Image: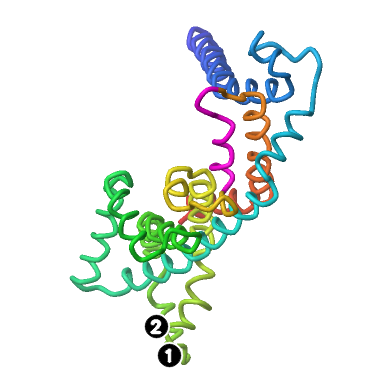
Amino acid sequence: MKSKKKLRISYILITIISCLIGVLFLSPFYIIIINAFKSKKQLFENTLSIPHSVTFDNFKEAFQRLDFISSLAHSLFITIVSVVLIVVFSSMAAWMLERTKSKLSGFIFTLFIASMIIPFQAVMLPLIRVMGKIHFLNVAGIIFMYVGFGSSLSIFLYHGFLKSIPKELDEAATIDGCNKFKTFWYIIFPLLKPMTITVAILNTVWIWNDYLLPSLVINKPNTLTIPLKTFFFFGEYTKQWNLALAGLILVIIPVIIFYFLAQKHIIKSITAGSIK
């Protein structure tokens, strides 16, 4: 009986703690949502209260200020192209490094792992200086840099996953007359789907939300991404919180849509990765 009481008490305590943690994590979303529908006056009167009168003017003005369609298109283009290139190049590189057992391949793989330790801020200024000299501070340049910075972690993840794929599949494909290119694309790459989804999600979230690198590379007003456009709500003397919060909700919507569309594949990738 005592053990049952202890279990019940521990269950109640865990439930209470879980609810408190849930409220703590959800509170920022509550603040963002309720204040996005308030006027500037209502927002400064009480930040935590429910709006007395709901207004959609913030969303209309934020939509125009963000130049939402244009900035969304730029963010989507940069994110999609960067992620596709990261997935293709990283999977190919990881496959060759894992299958080629030599000191050179081990050294190259170690270099990729070591590069993950170096923070971006340490190479930020020299990189921008070099890229500026070769006139590569544009959309193509930022995609090139995203591929470089995102490849190390992606190669590490693919390399670990490839160890669970038998090398005999490569040999069987070679016997059947496949060259290296066909062996990878028709045999190996389809088997990497769980890890490919994981790599794509990690890099999509990182690139979509990134502010620092685009702020250094993209200088033309007609090529700004959504994070850069959102920054314009915060001036030197004024901060338009009501418009900024409405803009944040508009920015979050594409991510939520992406999650719901990819939810089935995300769950599959997690379960497949755990089985592997």
Query: To which residue does mark 2 refer?
Result: 171
Q: Is residue 67 above or below residue 148?
A: above
What are the residue bounds of the magenta stretch?
225-237
Q: Secondary structure at mark 1?
A: helix
Which SS does the magenta portion mostly show?
A: helix
Query: To which residue does mark 1 refer?
Result: 175
Contact flag, marks 2 and 1 (Cβ < 8 Å): yes
The one nearer the camera, 38 or 117, is 38
Q: For residue 134, which quarter of the picture?
A: bottom left
Q: Position of residue 37 (x, y in %)?
A: 74, 23
Q: Position of residue 206 (x, y in %)?
A: 48, 47
- Image quadrant holding the C terminus, namely bottom left
The colour scheme used to paint the residues is rainbow
Q: Is 202 part of what is drawn in magenta? A: no
Mark 1 residue type: Ile
CA gap between label 2 and label 1 equals: 6 Å
The one nearer the camera, 72 or 221, is 221
The structure residue drawn at horizontal position 64% and vertical position 39%, both measured from the top left corner, is 252
Q: Position of residue 51 (x, y in %)?
A: 75, 15
Q: Position of residue 3 (x, y in %)?
A: 48, 12
**For mark 1, does the 10 Å Cα neighbourhood hold few (<14), some (14 to 19), or many (20 or more) residues?**
few
Using residue 111 as the reference point, say whether residue 220 is left or right of it: right
The one nearer the camera, 87 or 1, is 87
Identify the disc placed on residue 61: none
Q: Secondary structure at mark 2?
A: helix
